[in-house]
Image (cartoon, rainbow, N blue to C red):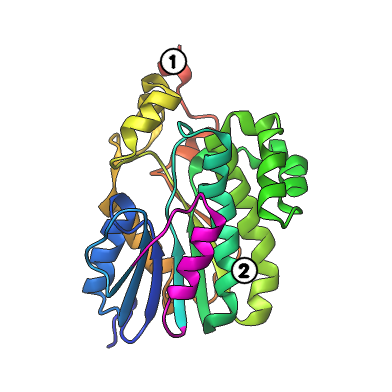
Amino acid sequence: MAPLVDYTNKRVVLTGGATGIGEALAVQLRGLNVGHLTILDIAPATNADLYIPVDLSDRHSVDEAMRSIEGPIDTVFSNAGVSALPGVRTCMAVNVAASRRLTDGLIDRITPGGTIVYTASMAGNGWPTHLAEINRLLDLADWDEFLDAAEASEPAQDVYPFSKACMQVYTMRRAYSAIRQGVRINSICPAPVDTPLMPAFRQSMGDKAIDWSVSVQGNGRMAVAADIAPSLAFMGSDAAAFINGVNLLVDSGFTAAMVTGQADFSGLA
């Protein structure tokens, strides 16, 4: 019997593959016989057949990187992200605008039945509260106009969760049109993950909030990159062929505890 998740002969593009979740995914894709792996990152990446340097906060760099990608594409993992520390404009550029630009720029090169998977976050679960503002911003197609409006947006001042809320909504919005081109779009929404970005998250969000969220999760520990990579690999594979427009929670039950009123808030006191 053929393996359920198999990347034999698949051509994959991955952003943020040098460290953290992206690096763990690249290792996993190698084990799944990926045909060709292109990694876009600001830092050199191992495990790549083709490494393309890119600054995802700069639309010109994103465009140049897309021009350097070779051949057709089966799966795009738009995984790279930053914390709130670089500021609203950079955070919204890397976490939202770059994913949108990559999607629009690459979708016509994706083979029928192919897919795009974003790494969002459970931090974006509050999107219903800001849906009108998120939709207003996502209606702005121009890179600079979008970022200018985001900088002036009140919800975006708490920028990291807002950026991930935008990606959850964008996933649902873009999936509808993409599937009519034969391309599925989904995201995964992890809990806090112990990667090289964690010190920046602790600085911007505070130790108490991070540690409390981990305490609510069913596993009772912080996720590591290897916990998250399999969900990405599944969502980017043919095994997920009938999944579209989904923000997949990978949070060890955190959201379930919140929705059902079982989360203990004493840790935030």
Query: Is 70 inside the magenta-drawn segment?
Result: yes
Kindly identify the amino acid type of the residue bearing the numbered disc 2.
Asp
- Asked where in the image residue 201 lies, by quadrant, the reply is top left
Give the magenta-colored segment's residue range: 52-72
Residue 65's place in the image compared with 140, above or below, is below
Relative to 244, say whether 58 is above or below. Answer: above
Q: Quadrant of the N terminus?
A: bottom left
- The answer to whether residue 149 of the structure is visible from this angle is yes
Q: Secondary structure at mark 2?
A: helix
Q: Is residue 132 left or right of residue 36?
A: right
Q: Position of residue 228 (x, y in %)?
A: 34, 53
Front-lying residue, 260 or 78? 78
Q: Percent x, y for residue 173? A: 69, 60
Q: Which residue is mark 1?
A: 266
In the rendered image, the quadrant that contains the C terminus is top left
Label 1: element kind: helix
Residue at the spot of label 2:
104
Q: CA distance from mark 1 to mark 2?
A: 44 Å
In the displayed structure image, the side of residue 125 where residue 188 appears, left or right: left
Amino acid on which the number 1 mark rests in the picture: Ser
| Residue 24 to residue 255: above or below | below
**Residue located 36% across and 22% down the image:** 207
Q: Is residue 259 visible?
A: no
